[in-house]
Image: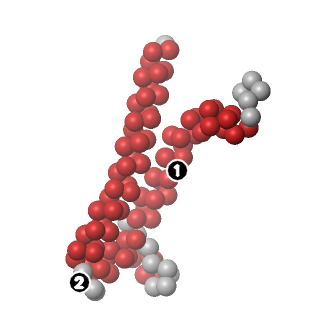
């Protein structure tokens, strides 16, 4: 850090080193939560629906297929974009380690 301000140290050192872990942690939490259909129905209430149940209800009960398709595509993008970012950062780090060796 060599005398930098704390916010600058965070942006220059801590955040770049933490990005792969942040992305991996987000994926580990979000991917299983997105696929839950039965557990929220059995354990929770309908007052706080999870995304899997919303999609299921839109397809089955409401018969609003365009809405369910739009939510499904949005969910797919929310899952794929962080995975692409994680792959990008990991390949970049791998190339950097390769050059240093």
Q: Is residue 49 left or right of residue 1?
A: left
**Residue drawn at 40 percent across, 30 percent down:** 91
Q: In this view, does 11 lie to the left or right of 81?
A: right
Q: Where residue 21 sits: x, y (%)?
A: 54, 43
Q: In this view, does 21 lie to the left or right of 70?
A: right
Disc 2 to disc 1, C-alpha distance: 34 Å
Q: Which residue is nearer to you in this view: 66 or 80?
A: 66
**Residue at the far top in the pictured view:** 101
Tell me, yes or no, whether the two marked residues, 2 and 1, touch with CB atoms within 8 Å: no
Q: Where residue 4 sits: x, y (%)?
A: 73, 30
Disc 2 packing (10 Å; few <14; some 14–19; many ≥20): few
Q: Where residue 55 sits: x, y (%)?
A: 32, 74
**Residue at the far right in the pictured view:** 3
Secondary element at image label 2? loop
In front of the other: label 2 or label 1? 2
Above or below residue 47? Residue 35 is above
Secondary element at image label 1? helix
Whether residue 14 is visible, yes or no, is no
Q: Mark 1 points at which residue?
A: 25
Q: Name the residue under label 2.
A: 63
Whether residue 50 is visible, yes or no, is yes
Above or below residue 63? Residue 22 is above
Above or below residue 23? Residue 51 is below
Disc 1 packing (10 Å; few <14; some 14–19; many ≥20): few
**Residue drawn at 37 percent across, 55 percent down:** 79
Question: Which badge, 2 or 1, comes first in the chain's sequence?
Answer: 1
Image quadrant assignment for residue 14:
top right
Q: Where residue 74 sits: x, y (%)?
A: 33, 62
Quadrant that contains the N terminus: top right
**Residue drawn at 32 percent across, 58 percent down:** 76
Q: Which mark is residue 75?
A: none
């Amino acid at each position: 850090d060599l005398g930098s301000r704390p916010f600058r140290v965070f942006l220059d050192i801590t955040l770049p080193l933490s990005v792969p872990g942040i992305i991996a942690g987000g994926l580990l939490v979000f991917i299983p939560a997105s696929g839950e259909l039965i557990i929220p129905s059995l354990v929770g209430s309908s007052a706080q629906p999870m995304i899997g149940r919303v999609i299921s209800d839109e397809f089955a009960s409401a018969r609003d297929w365009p809405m369910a398709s739009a939510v499904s595509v949005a969910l797919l993008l929310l899952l794929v974009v962080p995975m692409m970012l994680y792959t990008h950062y990991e390949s970049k780090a791998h190339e950097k380690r390769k050059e240093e060796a």
